């Protein structure tokens, strides 16, 4: 008989701040006690995906542009320092016809 596994979902404290004048969204996550190898960050033009897997805990979050007509640019950076994950992505207004 194979051992059963249990994955708990935990919410890490997260804050997103949009600086519209600078065209930048910053997402800050208190990811402690996760190590850098426990963290995955991916981004597209419409979503930033955060995934933290630490021991039996998984945290997943998708962040969309804060303004409906904005998209994320290729200006992207993720830094993990002293238990704090900071993800910064550029935003720009998309003009639709």
Image (spheres, helix red, strand yellow):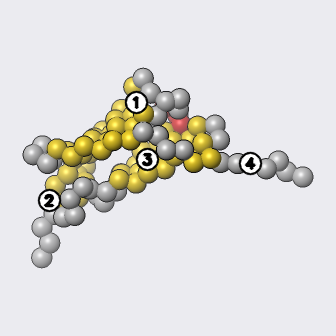
Task: Give left or right: position of 33 versus 16.
Answer: right
Q: Disc 1 designates what residue?
A: 84
State if disc 3 and disc 1 touch (CB < 8 Å): no
Residue 78: x percent and y percent?
35, 37
Disc on the earlier residue, 2 or 4: 4
Disc on the earlier residue, 4 or 1: 4
Q: Is residue 97 above or below residue 42?
A: below
The residue positioned 90% from the left and 52% from the top of the image is 1
Mark 3 crowdedness (10 Å alpha carbons): few <14, some 14-19, many ≥20: some
The residue positioned 31% from the left and 57% from the top of the image is 64
Q: Nearer the viewer, mark 2 or mark 1?
A: 1
State if disc 1 and disc 4 touch (CB < 8 Å): no
- For marks 2 and 4, give the CA distance: 44 Å
Comparing 75 with 39, the one in front is: 39
Q: Say what secondary structure mark 4 lies in.
A: loop
State if disc 4 and disc 3 touch (CB < 8 Å): no
**Residue 76 seen in the figure:** no
Q: Is residue 54 above or below residue 81?
A: below
Residue 18: x percent and y percent?
21, 46
**Residue 22 seen in the figure:** yes
Q: Disc 3 designates what residue?
A: 50
The residue positioned 56% from the left and 41% from the top of the image is 53
Q: Say what secondary structure mark 2 lies in.
A: strand
Q: Disc 2 designates what residue?
A: 93
- For marks 4 and 1, give the CA distance: 28 Å
- Of the 4 image quadrants, the one containing the C terminus is bottom left
């Amino acid at each position: 008989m194979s051992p059963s596994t249990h994955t708990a979902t935990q919410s890490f404290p997260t804050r997103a701040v949009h600086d519209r004048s600078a065209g930048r969204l910053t997402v800050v996550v208190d990811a402690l006690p996760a190590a850098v190898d426990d963290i995955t960050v991916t981004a597209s033009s419409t979503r930033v995906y955060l995934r933290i897997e630490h021991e039996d805990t998984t945290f997943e979050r998708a962040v969309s542009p804060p303004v409906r007509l904005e998209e994320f640019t290729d200006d992207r950076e993720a830094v993990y320092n002293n238990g704090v994950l900071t993800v910064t992505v550029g935003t720009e207004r998309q003009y639709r016809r």
